[in-house]
Image (tube, helix red, strand yellow):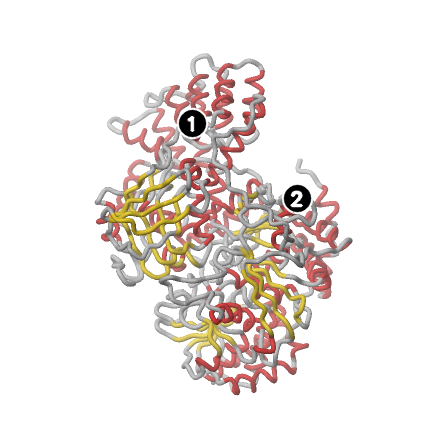
Amino acid sequence: MLEAYRQHVAERAALGVPPKPLDETQTAQLVELLKSPPAHEEEFLVNLLENRVPAGVDQAAYVKAAFLAAVAKGQATSPLVTKKRAVYLLGTMLGGYNVAPLVDLLDDETLGADAAEALKKTLLVFDAFHDVADKATAGNANAQAVLKSWADAEWFTSRPDVAEEIKITVFKVTGETNTDDLSPAQDAWSRPDIPLHANAMLKNERDGINPEKPGEVGPMSQIKELIAKGNTVAYVGDVVGTGSSRKSATNSVLWFFGDDIPHIPNKKDGGVCLGAKIAPIFFNTMEDAGALPIEIDVNNMNMGDEVTLKINKETATVTAFKEGQQIAESQLKTPVLLDEVRAGGRINLIIGRGLTTKAREALGLEPSTLFRTPVQPADTGKGYTQAQKMVGRACGLPEGTGIRPGTYCEPRMTTVGSQDTTGPMTRDELKDLACLGFSADLVMQSFCHTAAYPKPVDVVTHHTLPDFIMNRGGVSLRPGDGIIHSWLNRMLLPDTVGTGGDSHTRFPIGISFPAGSGLVAFAAATGVMPLDMPESVLVKFKGKMQPGITLRDLVHAIPYVAIQAGDLTVEKKGKKNIFNGRILEIDLSEYEGDLTVEQAFELSDASAERSAAGCSITLSEKSVAEYLTSNMTMLKWMIAEGYGDARTMARRVENMQKWLDNPSLIKADSDAEYAKVYEIDLSTITEPVLCCPNDPDDAKLLSDVAGAKIDEVFIGSCMTNIGHFRAAGKLLEKVEGGSLSTRLWLAPPTRMDEHQLMEEGYYNIYGRAGARTEMPGCSLCMGNQARVAPNTTCVSTSTRNFPNRLGQGANVYLASAELASVAAVLGRLPTVAEYMGYAQNIDSMAGEIYRYMNFDRMGEYTAEAGKVDTKKISAAQLT
């Protein structure tokens, strides 16, 4: 074991990273060596035990906790681990498998006080709290000491407070840093391996950044030089953290600039991040990781500068000084941020405050005044927006009452989604949270980002993650099923709140607040999520869509109109973005037509590209009822096909039926308040709107960019549905076989869409035209699977077009599937007149093309669904 491990250490050292934490088998072998240690290996073995085994409910942690408990209780011995040391080490394991032995040891005459000291700093005790309280009531002095310590929040006060002055060295990345820069999609396979994945941070050349190996390894030498100055190194940028919700971006930053966590391998917390604008999801993942994110003017901060941050804790003001001169001043987002940093992160603070509250209640004490509390906004007396009412309901407020912007709240999470490139990290976070069962009503895991071109590590994930999720009561999809959102949307309940570990978890019914893997794990485990309620921006579409105009054009009309109003800029320095961190609420009450829920998702999905915190849409009860009726059949079909967890899906079917029995939808009050209201008259949108290379904010009219040569076209991603592929097929069937002048990629969102398109003959059309069809899933969209050729110009229906995302050096226009199809045929962006000529044919067949997957009207699904009794399944108890 030692020989193999040392070889592993050497291999990792060659990559510039520490060894991986020990797994279950290695830890078991280590235990045997500790019982009878080889000569001269004593110190090495103890270090492995103390510092290289994961905490929480990892299987390796189970082996470690069992060994330490056995040593403490005299059931096993090691010349290297005393009983007292064993108890101390149990206290470093955060929670989970270590808690029960420590609670038992409170009764031990010799070790009881040591067990008490260990439990005082342990937050993840969950139901074991009652065991400690019972012992305290029965007169156990050690248990009483633990309870008093929890009540006094010694877990918090024993940690160092945030310094009033922090001297930083600036690591400046000019312009926009998106999460693809910090956690490249091509390296998604390594995300759970934090040190190795961090090597890819900023691996592509850009102003002021010098990668060690361009395209492979980031600016290691630059980083080391700054760290050598001895100050805290702060990540600084004009715009920081836009794009995906991946916590791996935060993990990479903190790996270089954060602090070691004692006894926890390959993970860090702390650190400082400064940005003129910090994207909301990235800000939240920084909070969760115990970092100090601050939005502040960074114009006078340059690479290598030494800057002193002075924090006034009374006013929550941060002032930056360089060479003795003030260069910037800002307010912390909330004074509670200081407590979050001290606690080691927002999640730690929430769990710890809850533990302190319970302990004080058990002891009959008044609530603690130790912690900072959010400043609650004044009630304006005005009405509430749709989103505010949804969150209010999720917080248990009286019906019709909403949550005011700026209010801290913890809404109930009804639906939580996880996908496969963040799922392994979410699994690790769930282990750290000692989670053995989900409290959120429905948690779903997909495999859409890795199924088509899996690496060996992805195959392992495909085999192991489904059981992990289902054993905790979650629903697991299968590789090849398709895109997370196309499935998760079909499991939603109207007007409920949820989250997901993908920035495009943007519910078309209800509202979701996407998050990093840490917060997603917390939401899944506890059933609630912390939220500082954002303001809302209202976009109201009025009138009727003009001929040839698609929903994707309406999606792009939102940034286009904001640019015209001066509320959104493409330039990153001094960036303006009215939507950043706010909820985008879309009002269709004066829209002529009745959008299906599938169509509405195209609007809500794109709120991610606006850096909005979430999105809500007004839809008709008829559309929602049609959608739920279809989805009930799909869920029953899934149960019949052997998907798990059957009880969770059956419970969701029953809750859908309850809504259908008494349908109602939340609507905004007429006097609701918004940060901004945009009214978009659809009669003014008379030509397609595209987003230009390489920025999803850079919205322009087709007439501004017509004629640009196109090399490759991608039709796919969560922004598409089956109607888009029929529309593409109708255009392609008029093309002479093999005559396309572009490389055309097609990837339907789900395997049900793929099957239906095959049944209708569209795959024959695609094949004759020379298109390349991909497995249902994310395909080119994320850039971690197949990619377009380097330095090509493309049209894509994908979600975003950040630099190097679809292909190295690629220039990508975002457009509708209909416009993308025309570009695929012509090999260039058409003129408006050319496009309208093609679009006329599509419009004439709209009834046939834009039909959606109504599973309740499709015999192959209803036949299987009819065999399932969801009432019986949802009522079943585990035996």
Q: Quadrant of the N terminus?
A: top left
Dot 2 lies on which element?
A: loop
Residue 16 visible from this viewpoint: no
Tell me the distance, in whole angstroms, between the alpha carbons under discs 1 and 2.
Answer: 39 Å
For label 1, the crowd category at 10 Å Cα-Cα, with few meaning under 14, some 14 to 19 and many 20 or more, is many
Q: Residue at x 24, y 51 (%)?
A: 305
Residue highlighted by disc 2: 397
Q: Quadrant of residue 10?
A: top left
Dot 1 lies on which element?
A: loop
Q: Nearer the viewer, residue 148 or 250?
A: 148
- In the rendered structure, which amino acid carries the disc numbered 1? Gly
- Tell me where residue 189 appears, x and y as whole percent: 41, 54
- In the rendered structure, which amino acid carries the disc numbered 2? Leu
Q: Is residue 241 left or right of residue 617?
A: left
Q: Nearer the viewer, residue 720 or 346?
A: 346
Q: Which mark is residue 91?
A: 1
Q: Nearer the viewer, residue 119 or 530?
A: 530
Q: Nearer the viewer, mark 1 or mark 2?
A: 2
- Tell me where residue 656 appears, x and y as whole percent: 71, 53
Q: Is residue 132 left or right of residue 860?
A: left
Q: Residue at x 53, y 85 (%)?
A: 735
Q: Does residue 639 lie above or below 354 as drawn?
A: below
Report if the CB atoms under discs 1 and 2 are less than 8 Å apart: no
Q: Residue at x 33, y 53 (%)?
A: 236
Residue 659 visible from this viewpoint: yes
For label 2, the crowd category at 10 Å Cα-Cα, with few meaning under 14, some 14 to 19 and many 20 or more, is some
Q: Is residue 546 left or right of residue 875?
A: left
Label 1 vs 2, first from the N-terminus: 1
Q: Which mark is residue 3?
A: none
